[in-house]
Amino acid sequence: MPFGRELFFFYIMALFGLFGKDKKKKLDQGLEKTKESFLSKLTRTVVGKSKVDDEVLDDLEEVLITSDVGVKTTLKIIERIEERVGREKYVSTSELQNVLRSEIASLLEENNTSDVEYDIPKHPDNNPHVIMVVGVNGVGKTTTIGKLAHQFKGMGKQVVLGAADTFRAAAVDQLIIWSERVGVPIVQQGMEADPASVAFETLEVAKAKGADVAIIDTAGRLHNKVNLMNELTKIKRVMQKVVPGAPHEILLVLDGSTGQNAFEQAKQFSLATEINALAITKLDGTAKGGVVIGISDQMKIPVKYIGVGEQMNDLQSFNRRAFVDSLFGE
Amino acid sequence: MFENLTDKFEKAFKVLKGQGQISEINIAETLKEVRRALLDADVNFNTAKEFTKTVKEKALGRDVLNAVSPGQLMVKICHEELIELMGGDETEVNYQGNPGIILMSGLQGSGKTTFSGKLANFLKSKKGKNPLLVACDVYRPAAIDQLHVLGDQIGVEVYSNKEEKNPVNIANAAIQHAKSNGNNVVIIDTAGRLAIDEQMMSEISDVKNAINPSETLFVVDAMTGQDAVNTAKAFNERINFDGVILTKLDGDTRGGAAISIKAVVDKPIKFVGTGEKMDALDVFYPKRMADRILGMGDVVSLVERAQEQYDEKEARRLQKKIKKNQFDFNDFLSQLQQVKKMGNVKDLMGMIPGMGKAMKNVEIEDDAFKHIEAIIYSMSPEEREHPEIINQSRKKRIAKGSGQSLTEVNKLLKQFGDTKKMMKMMSNKKNMANMMKQMKGGMPGM
């Protein structure tokens, strides 16, 4: 009975004409990752060689690509080293490590972001500092919020959490457990409540309590789902009714084991909500950080935090120098 | 879902188009592009290297003079190789046994709990099973609650024990429970764990040894980079899983993991997750995925989904109406409902050959139907049956009633008119066949 399926076929095509709306062309970008440390790979690359030649550069390309640095940034690094080799005529393989380190460090520095310390700015009228946490599904938003709350509390700050992920099953319960663990108040309206309404109430409560910081959890959303992305704009708008300028910080959480799609996520979320900080999670796994180099190079958003474990204390502020040092095993 | 990769392939093949013969020289640049496209798509470095090597050998070895064009030949070789890489024929999940036991494993946030729910729903609604979900994630806050919420949603029982902290004991007790309770499949959700976490890896290996599952699944986020392969390897060494589940494929990830996992651990990908709803899962078909990568569309999937929603009687009734040119807004509305049941419109569009590219710059909102429904619901029954009576003042009233602009109402009416004409034309089998041919002819690179 082929009629049915043809009808459907046709229908979808016909309907297509009804909904077509132009969308900005997407950009491509890339990352990749690794199991071994940078250093051990690098050592293997140059073993038995005295001079940096094409073969060494090819191997280096492989090291970078498989460390999730991404094709574009990798080529950039290689080009710079090629330039340097051309300029200095002879670069020994033992120097390669130093050269590479300084090139990576300068790539990270060019990206005019400053290393950010945990500090909560003061706002007029004793308004709380508002942080909205966003990201795709399963990157570790709620866990990151728990860790952040713990750190802020340790700094003597008063924290209020807002459970605006009212969509994913038991997401509210998950944040409640964190609030109990950390010992901070939480505002929640249960599952399926309007996220904007939860955010609104959270800010009201935070304001009434004279809290220093309010952290809003949001539902995971894939960045290509337009409606869900628009919802973020709404949450933001509603919050500004309580605290002008809120959210002061929109923290995009990226999974450290994500490949090239991490760039797409950063781009799309930026378009929707003016992301001004990144947190890279799960860096305690086998992927050791090429993703951070790639993102720092390509995006003009500072990497603020990195997640390195499951414990409450396993959230660090990102420090480029320390990061480059750790890549090279120091 | 692989639109980006397809673009790159097309770009790479452009270099070859118009050249008479594949030679070492003219293939080099193309292969470089192919390799870069694969790397950009998170395909494992070595897999990408192997892939381009094989493609090169096959391309050079063939009698290219007989090929219509080198570009076409290359597409064909890449297509064949992709299928080969992704694992040949599809394999089902083994849920046989008394009860059948399915064990989930994977990293944190890969989507194990959501997928457990989907699989239970699938086995219940499509395979007539009576599944039991088991909450063995004793670590993540509210993980147990999450499974309970999902279980309630799909009407599947969930076994949990918040007092018990040992997953082995929970799993064993759950299986006993299933036996006495008549559940013929047990799906065990476990905590997310890193492959380098020795303690957690021995835990899941203990669970596996204790319950001897009929199927052990490794759940992996489709957005994962090269680490997908490393993690898959590490899990495979410890628990020797039977299959892979690729989740979050409804994102715009290029999904290179799909290409390399099978190649590296030699385990098939069995299901893909395509959304947050409980019915958003698909069986993984390597061939279709290869088609998709190369922009050949996924017609078979679409047809299957259409058939699931297809009501023969209703279709006959419609066919008659179409032939008599009586198709009205009521029929349109009921068709809309059916299309909605088939899933996300954009996904569906992506499956139609040649559409993937056209769709790239188009955003179809999830509730795109809402506006149309609003307009139709604002029509009187008479207007729905006889759209031709809708004059300017009726249009204004409809626009007002539906909260849509007059332009939107006009657009819908025009579209409806065109639709009707096309449908009449297409209700003739011959015309339809011609159209399909045309669509095929329009396929990129073919």
Image (cartoon, coloured by chain):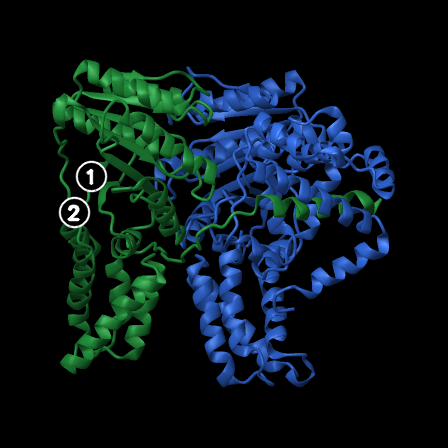
Disc 1 to disc 2, C-alpha distance: 9 Å
Residue B66 image point, x, y percent = 70, 83
Residue identified by numbered label 2: A319
Q: Is residue A293 visible?
A: yes
Judging depth in this view, the residue of A47 and A99 nearest the camera is A99
- The residue drawn where x is 43% and y is 27% is B137
| Mark number displayed over residue A200 | none
Height in image: A211 above or below B94? above
Residue B170 vs residue B304: left or right? left
Identify by letter the chain in green: A
- Quadrant, the C terminus of chain B: bottom right
Q: Secondary structure at mark 2?
A: loop
Which chain is indicated by disc 1?
A
Which residue ends up furthest to the front in the rendered image?
B393
Q: Secondary structure at mark 1?
A: strand
Identify by letter the chain in blue: B
Residue A112 image point, x, y percent = 17, 53
Mark 1 touching mark 2, by CB under 8 A? yes
Mark 2 is surrounded, within 10 Å at the Cα level, by few (under 14), some (14 to 19) or many (20 or more) other residues, namely some
Amino acid residing under circle 2:
Asn
